[in-house]
Image (cartoon, grey):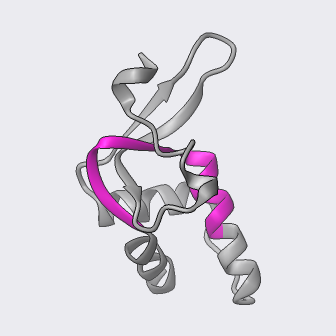
Amino acid sequence: MTLTTEWLQDHIIPDPRRSIPKATVRKKYAKYCLTASLKGVNDSTLGKVLKSCFPSVETKRLGQRQKSEYFYVGISWKYVTDDDTTENQDPEQEK
């Protein structure tokens, strides 16, 4: 679990104005585990570790009906790439 904590702290920062889709966090974490030849933790454990690293983070369902998805609200990617620009969203815009 220590490597999971380190990965989260290396890639995510607290930001009360932003949110990240849960699926994106999971996908990027799984890619890290695959490239590092590690056995990652399951979705539930990843969420618990993330919340222990960032206690103020909330989980919310955002988006329009039939198109909503779950987000971690209160965090942002530390290093934004072209892929992340559409994923770091302002929670107020989603309501």
- Frontmost residue, 72 versus 83: 83
Relative to 18, say whether 66 is above or below: above
- Residue 36 in percent (x, y) is at 69, 89
The reply to whether the magenta stretch includes residue 15 is yes
* In magenta segment, residue 90: no
Q: Is residue 76 left or right of residue 87?
A: left
- On the image, the x and y values in percent for residue 74 come to 31, 45
Is residue 51 in view from this perspective?
yes
Tell me where residue 18 sits by quadrant. top left
- Foreground residue, 46 or 92? 92
Numbered range of the magenta stretch? 12-29
Residue found at the far bottom of this picture = 37
Image coordinates of residue 60 in percent, x first then y, are 43, 31
Tell which residue pokes out farthest to the front in this image: 82
Task: Residue at 69% x, 13% y: name it.
Answer: 66
In the picture shown, does residue 85 fall above or below 8? above
| Left or right position of 59 against 38 | left
Residue 43 can be seen, yes or no: no
Which residue is pictured at 45% across the width and 68% down the height?
Answer: 79
Q: Write down the quadrant of residue 40 in the picture.
A: bottom right
Q: Residue at x 38, y 30 (%)?
A: 91
